[in-house]
Image: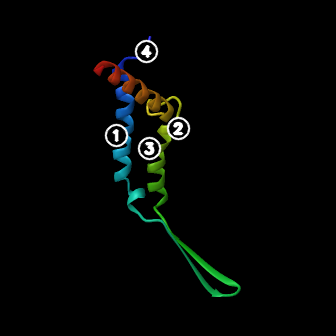
């Protein structure tokens, strides 16, 4: 017996909420840049400008859910849910 449509919609909604939350995180508001300066033949200087470690961790907490098999926002589960919702919706309109 297939899972109820509400569960499928709920999983998709979790991903949508996570996406909205990610876009507001500081890690995605900060540009990542790398600069290289060649001072001499033997001296090359490289500097990085990147988000703070805490900001990167906050982003990873959200993204990691998409790769946890036990989480409802696990991407393969969500893809299957979208496939089922699409089949149900197209079958209902026919």
User: Which dot marks residue 2?
Assistant: 4
For the point 38% across and 57% down, the residue is 26
Residue that badge 2 annotates:
67
- The location of residue 62, given as percent across then percent down, is 44, 43
User: Which dot marks residue 38?
Assistant: none
Residue that badge 1 annotates:
17
Q: How is the image coloured?
A: rainbow
Q: Secondary structure at mark 4?
A: loop
Return the disc, 1 or 3, that comes first in the chain's sequence.
1
Q: Quadrant of the N terminus?
A: top left
In the picture, residue 13 is in which quadrant? top left
Q: CA distance from mark 2 to mark 4?
A: 23 Å
Residue that badge 3 annotates:
62
Q: Quadrant of the C terminus?
A: top left
Q: Nearer the viewer, residue 55 or 65?
A: 65
Q: CA distance from mark 3 to mark 2?
A: 10 Å
Instruction: For label 4, count other residues whose C-alpha is less than 10 Å away and answer few (under 14), some (14-19) or many (20+).
Output: few
Left or right relative to 36: residue 17:
left
Return the disc, 4 or 3, that comes first in the chain's sequence.
4
Nearest to viewer (mark 1 / mark 4): 4
- The location of residue 58, given as percent across then percent down, is 44, 49
Return the disc, 1 or 2, that comes first in the chain's sequence.
1
In the displayed structure, 59 sits above or below 43; it is above
Q: Secondary structure at mark 3?
A: helix
Residue extending farthest to the top is 1
């Amino acid at each position: 017996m297939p899972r109820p449509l509400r569960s499928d919609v709920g999983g998709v909604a979790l991903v949508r909420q996570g996406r909205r939350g990610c876009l507001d995180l500081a890690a995605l508001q900060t540009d990542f840049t790398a600069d290289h300066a060649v001072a001499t033949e033997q001296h090359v200087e490289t500097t990085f400008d990147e988000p703070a470690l805490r900001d990167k961790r906050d982003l990873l907490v959200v993204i990691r859910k998409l790769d946890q098999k036990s989480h409802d926002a696990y991407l393969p589960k969500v893809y299957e849910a979208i496939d089922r919702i699409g089949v149900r919706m197209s079958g209902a309109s026919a």
